[in-house]
Image (cartoon, rainbow, N blue to C red):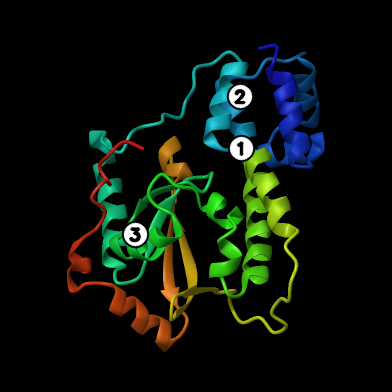
Amino acid sequence: MTQFPEALKDWRARRRLSQLELASEAGVSARHVAFLETGRARPSAAMVVRLAEALQIPMSDRNTLLTQAGFAARYPGRRWSDADMAPMRAAVERILGQHAPYPGIAVDRMWTVRLMNGPAARLFGPLGLAEGGSLVDLMLSESAPLLIENWPDVARRAASRLRIESASQGGVPALERAADRLGAVTGPVTDAPGPVTPTILRLGDRRLSLFAVIAQFGTPEDLLLEDLRIELFFPTDDRSRQALQDLSPQTDQEVSCPQIGSDL
């Protein structure tokens, strides 16, 4: 219990909320929040969850907050092989499998690739990216500026996204360091951006212009599901669309993710 008051105060500071603002979000009095932060009042488990929801704290950190307040962790961390994860496995399999001949991957909160479909394996494999690999490491590699035609644009957007995701998790040093390095990239940027910033890859004589659509589970109550994010890549022009079709065999639409049932 001794750690909870400081932890609550720290999370409130990260979210840049006053005691009054947090109290309003959580539907309690500012005096009660003050008492919780000084240790003069003890929270119930329901109050810890209520405050965590108001502060938009990730589930793993909500578990920590609960244990700091003297309660058991509430949010489990299942494995893909668990029986009750079967519907979720099927959903991810269908999304990634049916996305062929376009590449699709599933990544966790640290941008580690957990799953990828056949087109993604063929497209990103030569770049050194496979299941278990890190998108952040690829972005920070020496090869990224050589392979990505509009590297300054992509680096700037990636830095912004990393900072947003780090802030949502209460601050992640690894993501912040990566954002700082990508944010320091110099070079010409697009003067008249379109609806999205594409990633333009140069692979030999092929030029692929791609944008990503991101999907997440809508009501996660599990650490694995909260962390998992599906990124589906689409071509921005006919030449890129044809290149992806040429790279993929006809059987791709019948192949999803051979390791989707393995433990993450």
Residue 98 in the figure: left or right of residue 62: left
Residue lying at 27% horizontally and 54% vertically, measured from the top left: 93
Q: Kindly tell me whether residue 11 is visible in this rendering.
A: yes
Tell me the element at label 3: helix
> Which label's residue is closer to the chain start, 1 or 2?
1
Which of pointers 1 and 3 indicates the residue nearer the eye? 3
| Residue ID for mark 2 | 65
Q: Which mark is residue 191?
A: none
> Which label's residue is closer to the chain start, 2 or 3?
2
Q: Nearer the viewer, residue 119 or 18?
A: 119
Above or below for 213 versus 225: below
> Which label's residue is closer to the chain start, 1 or 3?
1
Above or below for 122 versus 65: below
| Residue 243 percent location from the top left of the image | 36, 80
Q: Kindly tell me whether residue 172 is visible in this rendering.
A: no
Q: Count how many numbered circles sit on residues in the image.
A: 3
Give the Cα distance between marks 1 and 3. 33 Å
Q: Which mark is residue 121?
A: 3
Q: Quadrant of the N terminus?
A: top right
Above or below for 254 versus 11: below
Residue lying at 31% horizontally and 36% vertically, measured from the top left: 263
Q: Which mark is residue 57?
A: 1
Give the Cα distance between marks 1 and 2. 9 Å
